Image (cartoon, rainbow, N blue to C red):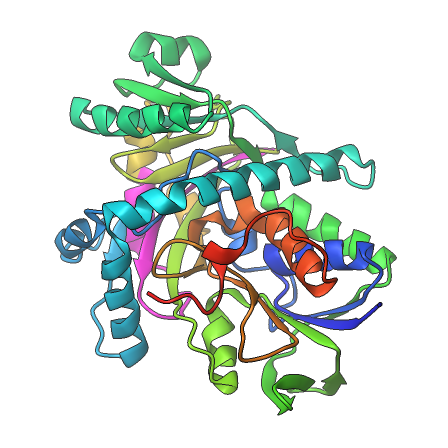
Amino acid sequence: MNKNIIIIGGGIIGLCSAYYLEKEGHQVTVIDKSNFSSGASYVNAGYITPSHFISLAAPGMITKGIKWMFNSASPFYVKPSLDLDFLKWTWAFKKSATPSKVEKSIKPIKDINLFSRDLYEAMKDSGDFNFHYERKGLLMCYKTDKVGEEEWKVGLRGIKEGLKVDLLSEKEVKTLEPKADTNFKGAVYYHSDSHMTPNHFMPEMIGYLKSKGVQFFSNEEVKDIEISNDSISKVVTNKQELSCDEVVLAAGSWSPLLTKKLDLKIPIQAGKGYRINVERETNITIPAILCEAKVAVTPMDGFTRFAGTMEVAGVNHDINPVRVNAIANAAKSYYNSVEITEEEKQQAESGLRPCSPDGLPYIGKSSKCSNLTIATGHAMMGWSLGPATGKLVAEVISNNKTSLDLSCFHPDRKF
């Protein structure tokens, strides 16, 4: 049965949900508080990352977070707060950061990333799009033996999970990147990963969806959700009221503002990331993560993007120049010939990633609302998991068997 579906949120998750729902024959409307040209979906590193199978809530992150709390240039910063939602999220994060829980999440995270990568490639092969997509893998670059050993330990686990992973010496890295003038000891090379140029893909997808009859309402904020018999009957924005059969909540870091209206307890904190674009030739050809600095480097279509930091400090887009400088300094430290200019730093932008306490996204229906499908909480894997999430959302709403087991992503899961 074809349904009238409202998607709240026009980022990568919302657009991919619209893409697969439209293919199932549903009538789709996408609402976003922005004008569909900004946010985390436009400023991310553009990675598709089967390599990132260890969740954000890894053992040791609490200890590192406390240490980094006193360093405003640190890769991971949590601003202390007495806000009740923040305290609950922090406690749930602590409970999730155990070896057994992280171990249990490895296969689901890897599988959904591989599934998503296949879906991106199917989109690319469909002939409907012309977006930039390359599968060149990902280099986890390190400067110290200690970090190299830690990364290779993860790499060995990746091999056990069926991924192709190599440990590269400094000389082998220079053979792979002969012109990049690298300055690190070595790298763990994941062949499984791909990369894209997000701000090219997003408008192309919007154009495609519009051509298929998907409606878009920009600069509209959802103010209320009307409930009748445990299901949503109307979505009320600052401009209109819309009736619907189903709702998809893909509002990223703003999702908790709406789940509260439905008395749903889905813990999310916004994790801010920054990006700097360099439109000069850097001679970097393979995506890399600069491990000690936690900075991502992506050779995009026409420019190189340097992105990084995870700053849990509420919903805001303030630019902290100390963090921008830390990214620029890391770039120079790992690539001798890269010098990010003051002008490039001035044009840095930020985006908010919706972080769940256990590093797993929320995908599926809550038992508290029969016609609401949740699709949020993807943290740093939002771009990577866009198509997989969209496909799973369409399967849930169309009552089809889901391509993956969704139990570990359930919105009602306990922490």
Instruction: Name which quarter of the figure residue 317 lies in.
Output: bottom left
Instruction: Name which quarter of the figure residue 20 lies in.
Output: bottom right
Q: Position of residue 286 (x, y in %)?
A: 48, 24
Residue at image point 62% right, 90% down: 227
Return the residue nearer the eye: 315 or 391. 391
200 to the left or right of 99: right
Residue at image point 35% right, 41% down: 54
256 to the left or right of 228: left
Q: Position of residue 175 (x, y in %)?
A: 42, 8
Q: Position of residue 330 (x, y in %)?
A: 29, 36
Return the residue nearer the eye: 335 or 394. 394
Instruction: Name which quarter of the figure residue 267 lies in.
Output: bottom left
Return the residue nearer the eye: 144 or 18. 18
From where the camera sits, is residue 46 visible?
no
Which quadrant would the N terminus be assigned to in this image?
bottom right
Which quadrant would the C terminus be assigned to in this image?
bottom left
Please say whether residue 317 is one of the residues in the magenta stretch: yes
Find the magenta span and give its range: 302-328
Q: Relative to residue 166, is residue 114 depicted above or below?
A: below
